[in-house]
Image (spheres, grey):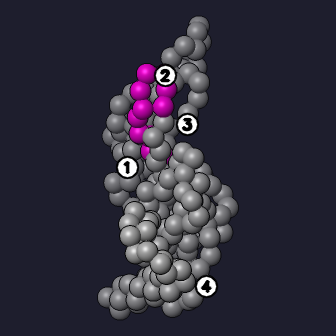
Amino acid sequence: MMKSFQGIACAAGLLIAAQAGAQELANPAEAFGQRPAVTSIALSPSGNRVVYLSAGSGEETFAYVADVGSTSPSVVTMTDGDPMEFNWCRFVNEERLVCSIYAMVQDPRQIYPITRLFAVDDDASDARTLGQRDNRYRDNRQFDGEIIDWLPEDDETVMMSRVYVPETYRGATRIVDRREGLAAVRINTRTGSSDSVEP
């Protein structure tokens, strides 16, 4: 419980610091529609670290990691809003994160949302996507799925409801991924290896 209070206090401190650093506007009405300084705050399993998202210039969003009580957060990764934006980031373990990003994309017929999940270390290394791999043989795949269990007993593994879209247009070959629909899958966030739990 104490760790939770410390994490919340750290997050509040970061928010206050971000607000203090913001320039005051001559016209308060200009503040309408401005992006929040800090969003999507989450503690690590030990409660000793915190990850959060913070708005940058324009449409940029940065993911920061900081030790509880520290005033020197480090940037893990960022999105530029063209077209991807952050949904959230969470800890898998003390060093590994899973982040969700989204975008609105357009084809000749429609505009539709897509989401993607990826894992990355807190030093911005070893990034890996967690959804089904995109390629030119699949129709538009909107969603990777969702994390349904963070499996705290498994250091780098999560349980995911993964969305599968079958491959088409490969021609006369046996190397075709015909999986389709929703499945429960255990995924190692570092190696990308997966085990089907429920197809």
Q: Is 86 one of the magenta-colored residues? A: no
Q: Main secondary structure of the magenta part?
A: strand
Categorize mark 1 by other alpha carbons within 10 Å: few (<14), some (14-19), many (20+). some
**Quarter of the picture holding the C terminus:** top left
Categorize mark 2 by other alpha carbons within 10 Å: few (<14), some (14-19), many (20+). few
At x 41%, y 85%, the residue is 12
Q: Is 111 one of the magenta-colored residues? A: yes
Given residues 122 and 175, the one toward you in this image is 122
Q: Amino acid at mark 2?
A: Pro
Q: Which residue is mark 2?
A: 108
Nearer to us: label 4 or label 2? 2
Q: From mark 1 to mark 3, how far is it between C-alphas? A: 15 Å
Residue segment shown in magenta: 106-119
Q: Which residue is mark 3?
A: 133
At x 50%, y 86%, the residue is 20
Nearer to us: label 4 or label 3? 4
Marks 1 and 4 in Cβ contact (< 8 Å): no
Q: Which residue is mark 4?
A: 72
Label whose residue precedes the other's in the sequence (2 or 1): 2
Nearer to us: label 2 or label 1? 2
Dot label at residue 146:
1
SS at mark 1 in the image:
strand
